Image (cartoon, rainbow, N blue to C red):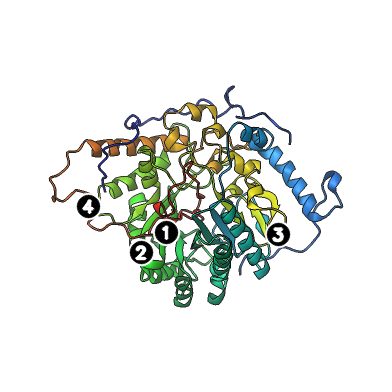
Amino acid sequence: MRRAVTSGTPLPAPDDPTPTPPPDLTDPAPSDTAPTAPSDAAPHPDPPAGPGPHVGPHAGLGPRVDAAVAQQVRHARHAPWPYTRLDVAAARAAGHRPHPIRQFVLKTRSRCNLACTYCYVYEMADQGWREQPPAMTPATIARAAQRIAEHAAAHDLPRVDLVLHGGEPLLSAPAQLAAPVDAVRTAVAAAAPATRVTATVQTNGTLLTRGRLTALAAAGIRVGVSLDGGLPAHNTRRVDHAGRPGFASAARGLRLLARHPQSYAGVLCVVDLDQDPIETYESLLAFDPPSVGLLLPLANWSSPPPGHHPGRTPYADWLLAVFERWWHDGVRRTRIRLFEEIIALLLGLPTTTETLGLTPAATAVIETDGSIEQADSLKSAYEGAAATGMTLDTHSFDQLLDHPGLAARQLGRDALAGWCRACELVDVCGGGHYPHRYRAGEGFRRPSVYCADLQRLIRHIAAAVQRAAQTPRPAAGAPVAGATDTPPAEGTEAVDATAPVTAPAEAPPAEASAAHPPAVAS
């Protein structure tokens, strides 16, 4: 699947089999300072009811105030960058303007019918789901719709992207699935009639039925499915609460979805070093996905990924095995989002997620209780890492833009570690996915824990693109090796669950790129 390259930004040097690790992985470099002045400022069971903790001088003023104060303390302890080292007002004065929210993740359900052993929502650092209502109420849906419409109108957004999420959003009855999307579309049509609303649901696939697919299709809601591979052996960690495997039900749902290509957004798969990469890739193709999202496991410097060793690049090796098969296929069998994003960035094109590149984060999460949070992937770092202390009743999405956690993810280079800022790959890598930079007690200003893997992956793909650019073009009308005769269907872009949507510094036209919901191991 080669692409001829005739113009674009200069490409990095060809493959380096032993990427040089950054010098500041253990201790921050002396120049690794903040860009602005410092400041001091069956399904999962429900938890037992009880009063929340009281913290500091605000004790007794109500559980929500106490929880907000406790959260500020946690942020300051776990992540000084950005929570005590970023002065948002100074950043604004220095020219860092906020970018509006363009993707809204609606947590319509906080419980799941599976109990995947690696799930970052239920099994990792943050256990906030225990405090959430099982389902979003109609009143919360209506308030979310109002806030989203308000934001779209204030910023003249050409498009907003909705992601129905959980938990498992398909725990809702078919008749209720489209209610949040219908509410948002109605509110946006009244407040910002020029704004288009797209919608996707991210599911584990086990509850897909003809009735649910019919309801989703009628509402124009596309479906992304999380899977660990296309064989039962790949999915041994995706089990229900009794320990029974969920693959058979998921495979049945995917086969049904494949018969509705207009509703099929794609498949997400977390890289598993214990599985053969080619076998995993080929097995996923059996479900005819329009796109495959290959995701690095959520990990960080305090909780490294499996197989992580200095000087080794096991995740790049795994991904490059798939890349070589995909790149040299005679026809395009599917899209692979990670590879296409790297190629686009190498050519200086805008991207739509924050897993790579330097475009600003533009995603907000609305929990079932109406609280406003940052991207779900932050839950892998520490308890409450995604929390903002904001709610739909008390805050607008414009106020979220000045939250230091989100503001830091809109700073581009200025949010990165010193070594990252000096790296020749920074425009492509962008420092890596934000949660992968975390180290306890320091925060999110280190290179990615996958730094060496990303270096090797990007350089290898750059070399492949360089070779394709230097290959003589065939005569007019002659077949092109690796090309497909059929252009991609509109709206078949990959669904990416660990990576939220980002807003390019110069936002492309509404039709220039499609929605890419965050990659979530549902």
Q: CA separation, marks 3 and 4?
A: 51 Å
Q: Disc 3, disc 4: CB below 8 Å? A: no
- Residue 209 versus residue 311 in the image, above or below: below
Label 1 neighbour load within 10 Å: few <14, some 14-19, many 20+: many
Residue occupying image coordinates x 36% and y 50%: 277
Q: CA separation, marks 1 and 4?
A: 22 Å
Specify which label sits upstream in the sequence, 2 or 4: 2
Q: Which residue is mark 4?
A: 330
Q: CA separation, marks 2 and 3?
A: 37 Å
Q: Amino acid at mark 2?
A: Phe
Q: Disc 1, disc 2: CB below 8 Å? A: yes
- Quarter residue 224 falls in: bottom left
Q: Nearer the viewer, residue 508 or 279?
A: 508
Residue occupying image coordinates x 61% and y 63%: 145
Q: Which numbered dot is residue 131?
A: 3
Q: Which numbered dot is residue 267?
A: 1
Residue 124 location (% of width, % of height): 60, 51
- Quarter residue 182 falls in: bottom right
Is residue 464 left or right of 231 when viewed as pictured?
left
Q: Which residue is mark 2?
A: 287
Q: Amino acid at mark 1?
A: Val
Specify which label sits upstream in the sequence, 1 or 2: 1
Q: Amino acid at mark 3?
A: Glu
